[in-house]
Image: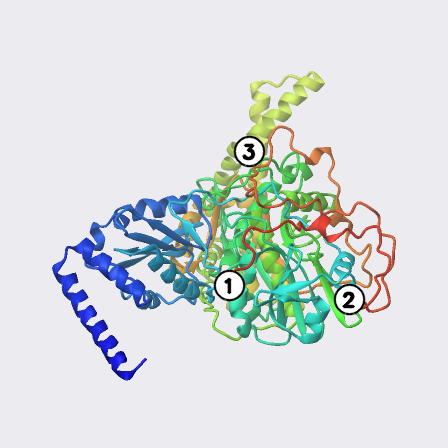
């Protein structure tokens, strides 16, 4: 084409553009928009419809409130997604739920700068005073193509990746599913992992090069990193550089979380860690993707232990006058104001409540109930103990074996962490493996998706620590520094009251306490005993006899209380001011005072005596000492009201009713149980066989099914006894002749479905 021809063409285009602008000005709006759309198509740029609209007058604005409330009614706890509602007037509502701490609100103004829009942040309450923050974006006029492009950019801001933007259509058609009938409890052995991935050489492909098939051995040898899919559907592998920062792999986190719905184990050599997940079978509302910010947090954690508990044994926590119990929530500083921290608190509540046959009601989380419970009646009553401690722990949660040149990791069970029950917080003595095994089997096979989620996060935490995978970026830690000794002031008020009681005050106080004890529970017990005596021994009590017995009970109770008050008053009066303050600090926050040596033991025994008196008084009777636990609770919460993460806050306390003398929590250790053999290494409780009393008699578990396209895997328990021993030779995939498999080794397809996935990869 000649230069002259070029000039003529350019001139024609300029004239056409000028004419187009004139037409846009003079023609009716609909025609003008049609011309704009055609011009955008011809010149291959984005068509943006007329933005001369008022947001408040659009349908999206009028419906936003009801759509948002409907979403949060169906998704009451943490759930991270992008939602989109489309209206007839081309207005749109975009919902960003559970904003991650790295998200910058200002980025929305940049992304939506060409559109008439409006944003608002909404706090969604979770627990007593916790919350998560959502963003609602209203678009005045946009096409579906506009929304697709915008959501792709927003996806990167939220998940640090533009991989597979996943959008929920609003109003939400489905509810979040907390129980599933599909199998999410796998017990895959080290031997099976070794056979599938090292002996048999399971092939993997990368989306960028689907023609090249790599085994795990190839990935180790080439030190390639990224996300791989098994050639035969079933597995997703995430290959990471060991002894390195995870920062170069950030964009892969979202992909792995979307494409793998359960973590099954891992393999590693000296340079590379390959995490193996089940290729997604469950829907996103059953097994939501693990959150990117939580995985970064776990990589950034250097502490070898993480903890969570409900501190029901704190001196100033307990039963209030209204009969409800309150207690502070404890989280390791890394977990405060994080999704994982909240998840641990919720599942701790479930452990206590469901172990107690649903009798411990939490007032604010109100988690959905299962259809049946692990024991035929509340465990506390079943055992007849005075105190019971419930714990999730990591003993046996993951096993590893170090072979020549590589290490294999598999999870004990993927359905839940192991359970421990102790007869007291002080003695930490197990009540017996029978009950722990029964509970572990129940929780693991219940199909609760949050219990499975805790296992996945715990597995990543252990794998990152064991393979020295770190993250040096900002995790927006927001531990409330004022939290530890917030109960010091009411503790000192209680001790001061006891220390300064006169003899006359002790007499009046113990008389009132004895009357309340008799009224609240002693009279009922005495009457029952008298009735039993009359029935069994043919005795008859006169009114005078009964009054005399009542009087003796009251007198003995008062005398016992009086002795205790005098003992504690004398103890407190004997302390120096420094000793007194140290005792008060220890009682208000035992975690904050170190107990070592003779002085530490003395302090422990003094605190034990104070706690014993508190149990004799009964915390619901502290009003007789001028102390209102409800006020203590309210002041505690108020002191933490402004302490939150960037977009979320974990609940500072919980309120329950019908509680007992119980405590509990999570003990997450980075320690992995290393074994020397791939057979018969699991503790017996991991392979617990249920008996008749474990099963529901009338109620069925609350379950839902995944979509029809999701294939249901076969059972995950071995059916034959393991008999072979570990092979000594180092296997080499593709080049070595496999040894005879143990009868206990199942084929991978009998455990993990190889059925095609509906949306594999991109």
Work out whether residue 601 can be spotted: no
Separation (CA) of disc 2 from disc 3:
73 Å
Name the residue rendered at 86%, 67% in the picture: 728
Q: Secondary structure at mark 2?
A: loop
Image vertical order of residue 396 relative to residue 703, above or below: below
Q: Secondary structure at mark 3?
A: helix
Is residue 505 found left or right of 85 in the rendered image? Answer: right
Which residue in the protein does label 3 denote?
A: 521
Separation (CA) of disc 2 from disc 1:
35 Å
Name the residue rendered at 55%, 39% in the picture: 704
Sequence-first disc among 2 and 1: 1
Give the class, few, some or many, for how many residues have Cα within 10 Å of label 1's Cα (few <14, many ≥20): many
Q: Are marks 2 and 3 in contact (CB under 8 Å)?
A: no
Which residue in the protein does label 2 denote?
A: 734
Is residue 624 found left or right of 119 in the rendered image? Answer: right
Q: Foreground residue, 580 or 366? A: 366
Q: Are marks 1 and 3 in contact (CB under 8 Å)?
A: no
Which residue in the protein does label 1 denote?
A: 292
> Mark 2 or mark 3: which is in front?
2
Name the residue rendered at 35%, 48% in the picture: 68
Sequence-first disc among 1 and 3: 1
């Amino acid at each position: 084409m000649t230069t002259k021809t070029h000039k003529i063409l350019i001139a024609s285009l300029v004239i056409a553009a000028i004419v187009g602008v004139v037409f846009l000005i003079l023609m009716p709006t609909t025609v003008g928009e049609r011309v704009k759309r055609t011009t955008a198509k011809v010149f291959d740029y984005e068509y943006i419809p007329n933005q001369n609209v008022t947001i408040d007058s659009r349908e999206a604005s009028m419906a936003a409130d009801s759509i948002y409330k409907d979403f949060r009614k169906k998704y009451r706890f943490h759930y991270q997604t992008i939602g989109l509602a489309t209206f007839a007037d081309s207005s749109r509502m975009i919902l960003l739920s559970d904003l991650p701490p790295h998200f910058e609100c200002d980025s929305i103004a940049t992304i939506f700068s060409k559109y008439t829009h409006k944003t608002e942040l909404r706090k969604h309450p979770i627990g007593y005073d916790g919350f998560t923050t959502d963003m609602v974006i209203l678009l005045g006029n946009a096409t579906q193509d506009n929304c697709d492009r915008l959501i792709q950019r927003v996806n990167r801001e939220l998940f640090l990746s533009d991989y597979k933007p996943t959008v929920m259509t609003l109003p939400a058609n489905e509810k979040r599913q907390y129980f599933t009938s599909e199998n999410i409890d796998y017990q895959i052995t080290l031997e099976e992992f070794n056979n599938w991935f090292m002996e048999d050489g399971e092939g993997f492909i990368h989306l960028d090069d689907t023609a090249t098939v790599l085994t795990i051995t190839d990935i180790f040898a080439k030190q390639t990193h990224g996300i791989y899919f098994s050639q035969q559907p079933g597995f997703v592998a995430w290959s990471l550089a060991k002894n390195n920062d995870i920062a170069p792999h950030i964009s892969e986190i979202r992909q792995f979380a979307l494409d793998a719905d359960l973590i099954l184990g891992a393999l590693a050599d000296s340079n590379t860690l390959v995490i193996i997940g089940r290729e997604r079978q469950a829907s996103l509302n059953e097994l939501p993707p693990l959150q990117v910010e939580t995985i970064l947090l776990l990589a950034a954690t250097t502490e070898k232990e993480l903890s969570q508990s409900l501190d029901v044994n704190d001196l100033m926590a307990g039963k209030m006058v209204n009969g409800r119990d309150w207690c502070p929530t404890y989280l390791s500083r890394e977990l405060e104001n994080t999704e994982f921290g909240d998840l641990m608190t919720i599942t701790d509540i479930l452990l206590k409540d469901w172990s107690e046959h649903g009798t411990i009601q939490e007032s604010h989380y109100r988690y959905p109930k299962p259809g049946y419970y692990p024991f035929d009646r509340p465990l506390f009553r079943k055992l007849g103990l005075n105190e019971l401690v419930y714990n999730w722990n990591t003993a046996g949660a993951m096993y590893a074996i170090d072979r020549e040149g590589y290490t294999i990791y598999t999870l004990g069970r993927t359905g839940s962490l192991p359970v421990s029950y102790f007869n007291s917080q002080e003695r930490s003595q197990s009540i017996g493996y029978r009950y722990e095994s029964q509970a572990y089997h129940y929780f693991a096979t219940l199909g609760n998706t949050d219990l499975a989620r805790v296992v996945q996060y715990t597995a990543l935490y252990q794998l990152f620590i064991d393979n020295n995978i770190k993250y040096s970026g900002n995790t927006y830690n927001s531990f409330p520094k004022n939290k530890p000794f917030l109960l010091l002031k009411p503790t000192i008020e209680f001790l001061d009251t006891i220390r300064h009681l006169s003899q006359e005050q002790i007499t009046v106080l113990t008389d009132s306490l004895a009357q309340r004890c008799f009224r609240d529970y002693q009279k009922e017990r005495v009457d029952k005993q008298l009735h039993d005596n009359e029935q069994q021994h043919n005795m008859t009590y006169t009114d005078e006899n009964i009054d005399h017995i009542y009087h003796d009970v009251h007198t003995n109770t008062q005398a016992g209380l009086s002795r205790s008050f005098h003992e504690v008053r004398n103890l407190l009066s004997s302390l120096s001011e420094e000793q007194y303050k140290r005792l008060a600090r220890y009682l208000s926050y035992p975690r904050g005072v170190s107990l070592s040596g003779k002085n530490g033991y003395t302090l422990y025994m003094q605190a034990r005596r104070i706690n014993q008196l508190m149990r004799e008084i009964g915390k619901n009777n502290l009003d007789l000492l001028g102390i209102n636990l409800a006020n203590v609770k309210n002041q505690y919460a108020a002191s933490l009201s402004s302490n939150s993460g960037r977009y979320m806050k974990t609940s500072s306390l919980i309120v329950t009713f019908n509680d007992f003398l119980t405590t509990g929590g999570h003990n997450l250790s980075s320690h992995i149980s290393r074994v020397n053999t791939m057979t018969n290494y699991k503790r017996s409780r991991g392979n617990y066989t249920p008996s008749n009393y474990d099963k529901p008699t009338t109620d069925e578990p609350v379950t839902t099914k995944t979509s029809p396209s999701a294939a249901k895997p076969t059972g995950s328990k071995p059916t034959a006894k393991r008999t072979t021993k570990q092979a000594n030779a180092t296997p080499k995939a593709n080049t070595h002749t496999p040894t005879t498999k143990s009868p206990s080794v199942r084929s991978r397809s009998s455990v993990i479905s190889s059925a095609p996935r509906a949306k594999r990869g991109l």
